[in-house]
């Protein structure tokens, strides 16, 4: 932990809580560090929290300024030079004092390094926004990235929701995915959804389906909404165990039936874990029987309530088998199969050389084609980066945030040359773009070869 003292920061050489040793092996001083997480002040002490472990770390004034200058634009050399001037200390002393915290945060995956400075990008309005209307939920799903349960104190009230919808419409956002928590648990859910629909914004509801009755299904049909319903198994006991509520499977299946009866297009979405992977073929058949329009699988990423639950992650080789099975169903008369991670590797190998594509952007379309607005109003590329120092729609317009957010623009700046390990040499990288950066983040190495890919880990 950082010792509380005046002047230049100091740090222990080993973090007792994490067991990570400071190796004093930082990138070159021409490299560009980025510390993207919140720092708050309590009395005379600055506080930052590890979003992956909730560990709180104290910083002195020098450590605070060091991390604030790790902004994704300044090089390490420039940062040390500026600190040396500010603290009237020679450069070598500043570097020696700074090295332990930089090394510790790098080892814990909280300080990100690139060879290039980030840029600010002029990109169109996002095609879609995933909007968590509430953190409240009637289930306690094991994988929930937002650890949904109780309602938070600072959720957007209805008036602010309408103002934000007006901003979305004026900016040209085409689709809203209303999520949570369980979005339908909000008493004003239909008022919000109907207001958005009146602005000609397409509505999709991401729901657990347990609150769908005939009236709710008809209301969604009347505004032309689509629904993505979470169902994890054709076996009720498996689903109920994962969602941690007895009887939830029956309510969800009934909700799907009512939606389809009302004419609402339904995507059946399953989070694939070691608990249900052997049942996914049967779940697909259930979706076919229910007449859902689309079947979608989602990889488990150990974040939120699922932090540290690596035993739920499916081995890449096993996920490859499932992906191959679902690909074989693309030509059948069943539900449409939504795009899956790394399915591109079943096609012929690209002919282009990876060296010619080092400027190709990596990562998903977060911060490019879509983003997340949390129940508190924070704007993120996706929920997996909750805890980052980002802008809030209560303080700034959505359009301003979309254009000017440092965090969003950092993600827009990531490119193939940032990837390490096997991904950096893989001909598929310009196609898959490294896939889910957040999955690597949970492994505390954001630019490592993707931990979900069966070409990286064939086991």
Image (cartoon, rainbow, N blue to C red):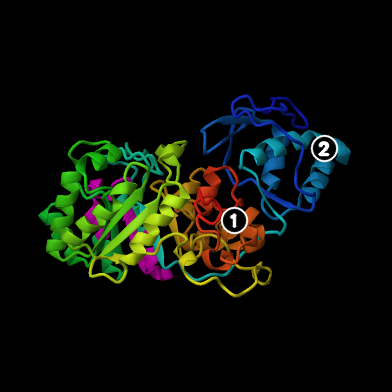
- Residue 46 image-quadrant placement: top right
Q: Tell me, for residue 94, which label it has, or none.
A: 2
Instruction: Report the number of discs.
Output: 2
Q: In the rendered structure, which segment of residues is drawn in magenta?
A: 164-193
Would you say residue 378 is visible in this rendering? Answer: no
**Foreground residue among 360 and 61:** 360
Secondary structure category for the residue under label 1: helix
The residue carrying mark 1 is: 406
Q: Residue at x 87, y 39 (%)?
A: 92
Q: Residue at x 28, y 41 (%)?
A: 137
Q: Are marks 2 and 1 in contact (CB under 8 Å)?
A: no
Q: Is residue 429 above or below residue 184?
A: below
Residue 422 in the image, given as x and y percentages of width and height: 62, 56
Mark 2, Cα crowd under 10 Å, few <14 / some 14-19 / many 20+, is: many
Is 30 part of what is drawn in magenta? no
**Residue 9 as seen in the image, left or right of residue 53:** right
**Foreground residue among 250 and 158:** 250
Secondary structure category for the residue under label 2: helix
Residue 195 in the image, given as x and y percentages of width and height: 26, 62
């Amino acid at each position: 932990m950082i010792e509380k003292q005046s002047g230049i920061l100091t740090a222990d050489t080993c973090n007792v809580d994490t067991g990570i040793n400071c190796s004093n092996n930082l990138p070159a001083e021409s490299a560009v560090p980025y510390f993207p997480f919140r720092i708050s002040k309590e009395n005379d002490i600055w506080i930052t929290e590890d979003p992956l472990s909730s560990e709180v770390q104290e910083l002195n004034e020098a450590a605070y300024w060091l991390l604030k200058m790790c902004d994704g634009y300044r090089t390490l050399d420039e940062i040390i030079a500026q600190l040396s001037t500010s603290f009237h200390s020679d450069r070598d002393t500043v570097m020696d004092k700074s090295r332990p915290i930089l090394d510790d945060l790098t080892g814990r995956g909280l300080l990100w390094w690139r060879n290039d400075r980030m840029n600010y990008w002029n990109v169109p309005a996002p095609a879609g926004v995933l909007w968590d209307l509430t953190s409240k939920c009637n289930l306690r799903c094991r994988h929930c990235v937002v650890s949904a349960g109780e309602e938070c104190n600072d959720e957007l009230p209805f008036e602010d929701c309408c103002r934000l919808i007006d901003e979305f419409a004026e900016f040209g956002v085409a689709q809203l995915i209303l999520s949570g928590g369980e979005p339908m648990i909000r008493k004003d859910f239909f008022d919000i959804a109907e207001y958005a629909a009146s602005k000609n914004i397409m509505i999709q509801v991401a729901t657990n389906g347990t609150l769908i009755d005939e009236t709710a299904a008809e209301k969604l049909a009347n505004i032309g909404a689509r629904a993505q319903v979470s169902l994890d198994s054709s076996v009720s006991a498996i689903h109920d165990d994962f969602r941690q509520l007895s009887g939830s499977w029956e309510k969800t299946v009934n909700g799907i039936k009512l939606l389809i009866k009302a004419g609402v297009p339904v995507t059946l979405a399953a989070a694939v874990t070691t608990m249900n992977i052997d049942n996914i073929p049967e779940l697909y058949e259930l979706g076919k029987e229910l007449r859902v329009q689309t079947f979608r699988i989602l990889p488990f990423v150990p974040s939120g309530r699922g932090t540290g639950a690596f035993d739920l992650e499916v081995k890449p080789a096993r996920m490859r088998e499932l992906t191959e099975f679902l690909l074989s169903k693309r030509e059948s008369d069943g539900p449409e199969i939504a795009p899956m991670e790394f399915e591109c590797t079943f096609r012929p190998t690209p002919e282009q050389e990876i060296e010619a594509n080092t400027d190709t952007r990596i990562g998903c379309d977060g911060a490019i084609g879509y983003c997340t607005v949390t129940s508190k109003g924070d704007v993120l590329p996706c929920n997996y980066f909750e805890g980052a120092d980002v802008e809030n729609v209560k303080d700034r317009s959505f359009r301003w945030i979309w254009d000017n957010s440092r965090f969003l623009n950092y993600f827009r700046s990531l490119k193939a040359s940032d990837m390490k390990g096997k991904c950096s040499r893989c001909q598929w990288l310009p196609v898959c773009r490294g896939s889910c950066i957040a999955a690597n983040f949970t492994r505390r190495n954001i630019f490592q070869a993707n931990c979900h890919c069966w070409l990286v880990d064939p086991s």
